[in-house]
Amino acid sequence: NVIEHRYSLDHKGRPWLQLNIANTHHVQAGSSPRFFDGEAIEGSVDLDLEGEKDIKSVAITLLGIATVQTFKPLNFLHITQTLWGHQQSGESSHLSGKRSWPFVLSLPHEVTVTDKSKDHSTVYRLPPTFSERGWNSTTSIGYRILVSVHAGTFTPDSFLAANLFVLPKTVADPPSSHRRKAYDSGLPLPGPDIDPEAWVELPPVIVKGKPSGSREPQVTCTVRLILICSPKLTYALGAYIPLILTLASPDKEALESLADPNCVNIVLERFLGVGTGQLDAPSTKDGNAFKDFCATAVFWPMDEPDEGVKRLQGEIQVPWKLRPSCSFATILIKYAVSLLPFRAADFHWEGNKEVALVKQEVTVVTLNAEGVVPKSLAPP
């Protein structure tokens, strides 16, 4: 279904300039039109003049602007079309009544950003719409359609703008054959013994602490993350990241304490770097680097294969509100699945509780592989 978004400039309560944008993606009422890179933005510009108005030209522009507080805005996208001009058309500049001009503007897949101070240009994938306030800084990437009505010499020009919500169309890698069969049949995902290509095992972690404040056992944690047939781990917005956590220790009390699903603390961690330092490389040399936790895993018990071993299965849902992984001139967005210290009340932790014991970088994309609809495996 096509939804038409309408924007207008009014005069005496009556719209005289209207911008219409057609959109095929589902959006909530009042939201901006949504597009992926490479898609065409189609619509029309309408004039409805009560009297005669001196107009030299009507143009429409697609803009992409990145802003970082204290830095000059970066205009990375600028595509303009002249819809009507009195010189090109040979018509009089004195317009009246109703006029309508269709337009088509295409979002590119890539943009070129030039660092003039170093005479160097870099090609980037079109970045996502983004806005963040915090850490004494405001960062944004915005897209808009701008209609410009250029009037006569003694009349001010008129402008009408509409914001767009733009995402790069990045797709998750296809799952393994075993994994796809599980999705298609609604069965639980096969584990690493059956489907080893779909899992990656992280290095074991030695957890040190003192249960009851008296002893000092060691609990070995092995975290397995799903691997989707690729050296890179890619997960779409809204998808689930499956996890298996294995804990082993000869100390039964410590093992029972840490194997409580409510004590496991695995999160999806976001790393955000902003500033003009991004022009040189995906770095954060300006010092504007931040991290936060955007989702937490849920766990439930699995079988216990051996004495002194506990296994938990879990998952993290990638929040829909996140922006996909991005490396752009002014912004770097990365994600990782991080195992943080356990939250066991009767286990006295040694070390910083905010520092990850082990982590695996993952890539967040916008769409699942074709035909794949990941579902939650968590028990009701």
Image (cartoon, rainbow, N blue to C red):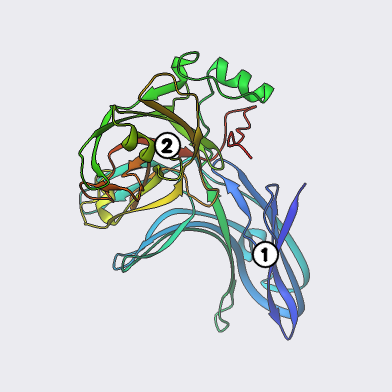
Relative to 369, residue 36 above or below:
below
How many angstroms separate mark 2 from mark 1 (CA)?
30 Å
Residue 332 seen anywhere in this rendered image of the structure: no
For this orientation, the residue located farthest to the top is 194
Comparing 234 with 7, the one in front is: 234
Give amino acid for label 1.
Answer: Gly
Badge 2 element: strand
Give me the residue at 70% from left, 47% from top: 24
Residue 52: % across, % down? 73, 79
The residue indicated by pointer 1 is 30
Comparing 7 with 324, the one in front is: 324
Which mark identifies residue 363? 2
Relative to 7, residue 204 above or below:
above
Residue 138: % across, % down? 37, 66
Mark toward the start of the polypeptide (2 vs 1)? 1
| Location of residue 359 by image quarter | top left
For this orientation, the residue located farthest to the bottom is 12
Give me the residue at 21% from left, 46% from top: 350
Relative horizontal placement of residue 375, taking residue 350 as reference (left or right): right
Residue 75: % across, % down? 40, 58
Q: Nearer the viewer, mark 2 or mark 1?
A: 2
Badge 1 element: loop
Crowd around label 1: few <14 · some 14–19 · many ≥20 (10 Å): few
Relative to 32, residue 305 above or below:
above
Relative horizontal placement of residue 295, taking residue 217 as reference (left or right): right
Comparing 25 with 101, the one in front is: 25
Residue 335 seen anywhere in this rendered image of the structure: yes
Which mark identifies residue 65? none
Count of all numbered marks drawn on residues in the image: 2
Relative to 222, residue 317 above or below:
below
Give amino acid for label 2.
Answer: Thr
